[in-house]
Image (cartoon, rainbow, N blue to C red):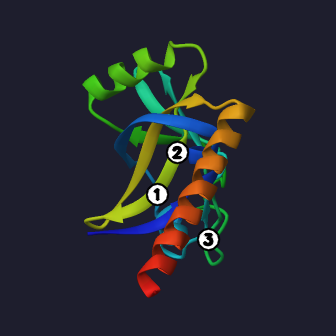
Amino acid sequence: MSQEIASNRKARRDYHILETYEAGMELKGTEVKSVRGGKVNIADAFARVEKGQMFLYGCHIQPWETAGKWFQHESRRPRRLLLHKQEIRKLEHAMEVKGSTLPCLRMYWKNGRVKVELGVGKGKTHGDQRQDLKQKVEMREAQREVARFNRQ
């Protein structure tokens, strides 16, 4: 049972997602409170491997309103992702391919913990995006025809 916190619809539009991985996230107390309030933006979030550890960049978690500045967190700080060592190595090798990236697809709750879904993505060209849009339009029209046929 998982409850979605935020999703990055732009990632599936801009990238061919080849594989997906689930990762835990290391957060501070005020960050967890902000996440519970839904004050998260992952539109520009991506992951990177550094020194054998995985970090999430570009994830904006709004500061908690009632916390003092001593306990407050930085809104765009790099956050460590929790993955098995074999998964980190596998992702590191996947990133060596030119044009590949690790966009954050969605953030959700799972068993009381914040999880992040990462995708191994290969960038789409403008033509690929147009082709996907064309397929969507064709599918929508076909479904309309089927619905109209069923009504008669």
Q: Position of residue 14 (x, y in %)?
A: 64, 40
Q: Nearer the viewer, mark 2 or mark 3?
A: 2
Q: Position of residue 62 (x, y in %)?
A: 65, 64
Q: Secondary structure at mark 1?
A: strand
Query: Is disc 1 in contact with disc 2, using a CB cutoff of under 8 Å?
Result: yes
Which residue appears farthest toward the bottom when viewing the image?
A: 151
- Does the image show residue 42? no
Image quadrant occupied by the N terminus: bottom left
Q: Secondary structure at mark 3?
A: loop
Which disc is residue 107 wearing?
1
Which disc is residue 104 wearing?
2
In primary-sequence order, the first of circles 2 and 3 is 3
Q: Position of residue 102 (x, y in %)?
A: 52, 33
149 w.r.t. 60: above or below: below
Q: Is residue 59 left or right of residue 55?
A: right
Q: Secondary structure at mark 2?
A: strand
149 w.r.t. 112: above or below: below
- Does the image show residue 44? yes
In primary-sequence order, the first of circles 3 and 1 is 3
Which disc is residue 64 wearing?
3
Q: Please tell me which residue is depicted at 48% across the width and 54% down the height of the picture.
A: 106
Q: Is residue 119 left or right of residue 12?
A: left
**Marks 2 and 3, how far apart at CA:** 23 Å
Q: Please tell me which residue is depicted at 50% across the width and 19% down the height of the picture.
A: 95
| Count of number-bearing discs | 3
Hey, what amino acid is under mark 2? Cys
CA neighbours of label 1 inside 10 A, class few (<14), some (14 to 19), many (20+) = many
Q: Position of residue 112 (x, y in %)?
A: 30, 67
Query: Is disc 2 in contact with disc 3, using a CB cutoff of under 8 Å?
Result: no
Hey, what amino acid is under mark 3? Trp
**Marks 1 and 2, how far apart at CA:** 8 Å
Hey, what amino acid is under mark 1? Met
